Image: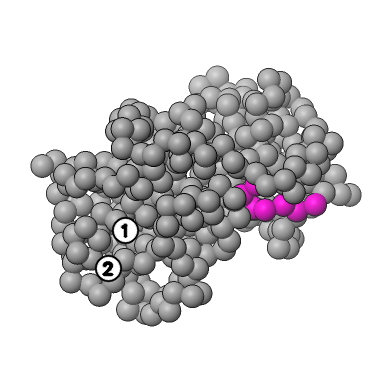
Amino acid sequence: MNTATQKLNKFLQLLTPLQRVVIQAHDFPDHDAIAAAYGLATLMQSMGMNTLIVYNGHIDRISLSNMIEWLEIPVVHCNKANLTAHDKIITVDGCIGEKNVTDIQGEEIAVIDHHNVTPPKGLWYCDVRSNYGATASIIYEYFRSLNIEIPEKVATALLVGLNIDTANLTRGFCNADLKAFLGLNQIADLTLVNRVCRNSLVQSELKSFQQLCDNVESTDGIAIVLLQEPCAKNLLGVLADFLLSVNEYDIVIVAMKYNQAIQLSLRSECPKVNVGLLLRQTLNQKQRGFGGGHAHMAGGMILDDKSHHFITNEHAHFTPFINAIKQLRADKNGSSQIPDIVIC
Ligand SMILES: [Mn+2]
């Protein structure tokens, strides 16, 4: 048994005496977050534990609510979960301390994530693999390393998570994701996987694409859009993916005003520009907002009272981002960060 599996085993043994274990997906969860939570919950149940999957925010993609309904995944909004201070919480596909993980009732004991994050010290367990394309692939490995059979429904959910986070293995994936893809394909209901992934929009969302096309501006291969009307939070990423499919753009910034702030979704296919780090440097480190994610795909928000740096007279110029991107592009040695795995 390798050290990673030993650590996982030890952690699971610590959990066994607990009445229940809460598994928290990041706020406004996506497919990978729910699939990973569901996979982990199923694994723990097969070892005799009680689990509860919770999230904060809304499930705002039709494809995700379809997945939850069709696979009968038990998820509960954290306000309806009757959480207590005694609850122990595992955070999946997100990290304690990040802006997209609400501090809910209970004690955070573990982080399982594939974002570029720094978990707090003193956790019972943490497994952060920022080179992985999806948390689903980490959960796949847990099943394999513990020799637990993966139920078809779990494989179906994990494969959806993996496909969507990596845009069908076209971004930010590693060999472990390929192995998971192959393994999951042999178990999953592929008709269902494809039906979930294909139906990613509802008709009323088409108008956001119209707005996107009407308002896109570009400079130096960077496409910028500030949507005039807000849309579902997780639609921003879908719109950003769509814009990145335009040949002339290799970096995309899609924004909208939402809840007294400006919400952002970024995409990059430029190897010199890691948009997760770009947001950390331009927002978090300058106290202008919060953001993070991956080299190719990131999200964040600009605080309302800092928005004048980015928007003047209703015109989104996003100068701090543009300047940082231009600098990175000009850097001869510029490249994204070294992949990292931290298991403790
Ligand atoms: Mn993910």
Which residue is more in the foreground, 81 or 294?
81
Dot 2 or dot 1: first in sequence order is 1
Which residue is more in the foreground, 298 or 81?
81
Callout 1: SS: helix
Look at the image and tell me whether residue 250 can be seen: yes
Please state if 99 lies on the left or on the right of 244 as rendered. Answer: left
Q: Is mark 2 within 8 Å of ligand 1?
A: no
In the picture, residue 156 is in which quadrant?
top left
Q: Quadrant of the N terminus?
A: top left
Callout 2: SS: loop
Q: Amino acid at mark 2?
A: Asn
**Can residue 281 be found in the magenta stretch?**
no
Residue 224 in percent (x, y) is at 74, 36
In the picture, residue 136 is in which quadrant?
top left
Q: CA distance from mark 2 to mark 1?
A: 8 Å
Q: Which residues are magenta?
A: 229-235
Which residue is more in the foreground, 156 or 334?
156
Look at the image and tell me whether residue 102 can be seen: no
* Residue holding disc 2: 50
* Residue holding disc 1: 41
Residue 127 in percent (x, y) is at 31, 49
- Residue at image position (52%, 65%) is 56
Residue 278 in percent (x, y) is at 58, 40
- Residue at image position (71%, 21%) is 248
